[in-house]
Amino acid sequence: MTGFASAPGRVNLIGEHIDYNGGMVLPAALSVGVSIELEPREDDGVFVTADQYDAPVERQLSKDAKGHWSDPSVGALREANTLGLLTGGANLTVRSNIPQGAGISSSAALTVAILKAARDASGVSALTDQDIAIAARRVENEYLGVPCGIMDQFAVAIATPGKAMALDTASLEYELLDLPANHTFVVIHSGVSRKLTDGRYKERKVECDEAKIYFKTDNLCALEPEEIAASSLHEAARKRALHCATEHRRVLATVDALKAGDVETIGAMMNESHVSMRDVFEMSVAPIDALVASATEAGALGARLTGGGFGGCIVALVEKTGKEEWLARLLEAHRDAWFVCEA
Ligand code: GAF
């Protein structure tokens, strides 16, 4: 039976690089997304047609990843076999309007949507969306070699448009929260593309792992910032751990502010988060810093880099009234930047 499913992209409002360090994150589903049509096959073959690529591709399930755009599809289908949802390859039709390399989870949306389409095709309903999210993370970690956390898969498998998801990545408990009524989170691409496979994401993960070994903990976010600052851990790992502990606290403050409708505090936390990502976690690049600075100068309450870093998108909190003028001013000053969508 043919299976169908879709998954949205996500923007992380605040809480970067702490989903593999025990922290709280705050992603929200986007209006852009991926939809999948999956026709199961009995043989090992995988045939992928994707509207973001000119030519379809023929692959084999049994062969390893090879740096091709269809690797996430093959990985998701292998995982679907492991889960007992399929007994062979599949013909896939992928439709997506999520820009790639933008930090808004094009890859997680694709793998989650394929797994959900395989679940649909199989008629096996015992598998929850949470199981799908965990399986999709395995595809990234084990098949694609990306040592990411659980945030993206969880957000795109479960989050509801119009809500933010306060996700405790240590316990996987979450709460869906209303977004502010009179303000909007605008996602703007800097024009600088990035890939999680390019090595810098992994480098940060290794530094965080060094801090975990030093402090004998799995949860850098539970440490006191003062304890980290006073430690004799080497500088890079100390700075990464410090970002995690302070970023986690900023997420908690943002969640409280969101519940209280306190948009000023949300904006202030976003601004502080960007400074920490730029100077302490060192995951920003000059065009992103310039875009963030202009966004607040033009009237945003807060703005920050979002996602894995080293390029991609920023997210800015802007009053709905006056958003168009704000956007026009920003894009006029940054000719490589472009509007993606709103949360
Ligand atoms: C990427 C990863 F996939 C996430 O797990 C997360 O670490 C994020 O970067 C940074 O917050 O999107």
Image (cartoon, rainbow, N blue to C red):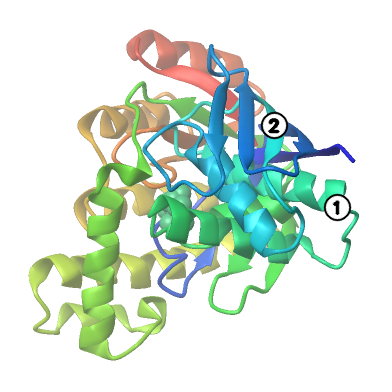
Residue 287 coordinates in the image, percent (x, y): 26, 27
Residue 268 in sight in this render: no
Give the x, y percent position of residue 127: 80, 65
Indicate which disc residue 122 carries: 1
Towards the viewer: 122 or 62: 62
- Cα–Cα span, label 2 and label 1: 15 Å
Extreme front residue here?
43
Q: Answer yes or no: disc 2 within 8 Å of ligand 1.
A: no
Q: Residue at x 25, y 88 (%)?
A: 215
Q: Is residue 247 above or below residue 279?
A: below
- For the point 43% across and 68% down, the residue is 20
- Vertical side of 212 occupied by 54: above or below: above
- Location of the N terminus by quadrant is top right
> Would residue 289 be seen by someone viewing this image from the given angle?
yes
Tell me where residue 195 appears, x and y as whole percent. 35, 38
Q: Earlier in the sequence, mark 2 or mark 1?
A: 2
Residue 102 image point, x, y percent: 44, 32
Q: On the image, numbered disc 2 is attached to which residue?
A: 92
Element on which disc 1 rests: helix
Q: Is residue 241 left or right of residue 43?
A: left
Check residue 329 in the rendering and tell me which mark sits there, or answer none: none
**SS for tag 2?**
strand
Q: Amino acid at mark 1?
A: Ser
Query: Is 140 situated left or right of 36 in this image?
Result: left
- The 10 Å Cα crowd at callout 1, few under 14, some 14 to 19, many 20 or more, is some
Residue 185 is left or right of residue 227, and the answer is: right
Q: Residues within 10 Å of mark 2 (few under 14, many from 20)?
A: many
